Amino acid sequence: MSMQPDRQAPPVTAQECAKHAAAAAALDHVRDGMRLGLGTGSTAAIFVALLGDRVAAGLRVTGVPTSERTAEQARDLGIALATLDEMPELDLTIDGADEYDPSLRLIKGGGGALLREKIVACASRRMLVIADASKAADVLGRFPLPVEVNRFGLGATRLAVERAAARSGCDGEIALRRRDGEPFLTDGGHLILDCRFGAIPNPEALAAGLAAVPGVVEHGLFLGIAGVILSGNPDGTVTSLGHPDVR
Ligand code: 5RP
């Protein structure tokens, strides 16, 4: 039996109100019969709860969850689920973000689901991001960049990450993510390095450098993946960035 509430509690704080507004606006992009990537995090969870209401009212969609957490929530709500093996191409992924810039570049992975999130988003024709406006940044990097790494060779991988970052003009503390005093493990059984680089002057160069490190499984820079960002404001209005038909 799941501990997750079936329905989302009504928004109380201004930030919750903003997240709710973004999640609700995303429903307008969902059509009957769609194959949907379902994101991870508190904003994505609001979207999944609202989607569950629509499914209960007769909407037919199939979701591919980006984490065990989201899978459990969706299952509890009666949303039909599939894997990317069964359904390798999706119509739309709806997911949150930890930070976004005016070019729709993202930092993701605060919830530790970045690997599955990126695989699912890239298997989708479009990615729609739902976030509250506090996630907006002129330059990415205020949020520590999550880098998912293999457990083997952690020390060497950390050093290689540091050197790759330096080559793209980034430096700062690189910390192993912990939960309850123990190393945090992703759904795939990997570790996460949270990289406090501050402003990232060239996200593309950093992404390429990180991708070339053998122990790096994936990094939280989502570049050229999001087509639209629905940014919720505290007053409940939503600002849309990007174009719905563009990846
Ligand atoms: C999880 C993520 C989330 O999308 C991100 O952390 C945003 O979460 P929230 O909606 O709770 O602010 O990348 O890996």
Image (cartoon, grey):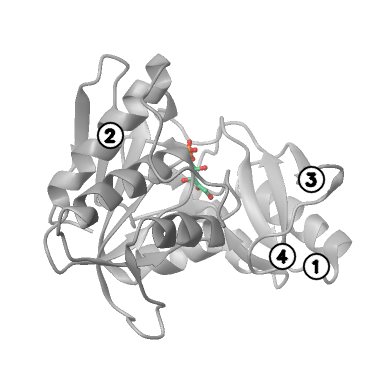
Q: Amino acid at mark 2?
A: Ala
- Taking 215 as reference, is 26 left or right? left
Cβ–Cβ under 8 Å for marks 4 and 1: yes
Element type where label 1 sits in the image: loop
Q: Nearer the viewer, residue 7 or 111?
A: 7
Quadrant in the picture for residue 156: bottom right
Q: Which residue is mark 2?
A: 22
**Residue 245 location, x and y as percent?**
12, 56
Quadrant in the picture for residue 34: bottom left
Q: Which residue is mark 1?
A: 151
> Is disc 3 surrounded by few (<14), some (14 to 19) or many (20+) residues within 10 Å?
some
Cβ–Cβ under 8 Å for marks 1 and 3: no
> Is disc 1 surrounded by few (<14), some (14 to 19) or many (20+) residues within 10 Å?
some
Q: Is residue 189 visible?
A: yes
Disc 4 to disc 3, C-alpha distance: 12 Å
Quadrant in the picture for residue 96: top left
**Residue 173 location, x and y as percent?**
77, 37
Q: Which residue is mark 3?
A: 178
Q: Which residue is mark 4?
A: 190
Q: Is residue 96 visible?
A: no
Q: Between label 1 and label 3, give the one nearer the viewer.
A: 3
Q: Amino acid at mark 4?
A: His
Element type where label 4 sits in the image: loop
Disc 1 to disc 3, C-alpha distance: 14 Å
Q: Residue at x 19, y 46 (%)?
A: 27
**Mark 2 or mark 4: which comes first in sequence?**
2
Q: Residue furthest bottom?
A: 86
Q: Nearer the viewer, residue 73 or 95?
A: 73
Q: Between label 2 and label 1, give the one nearer the viewer.
A: 2
Q: Residue at x 52, y 60 (%)?
A: 67
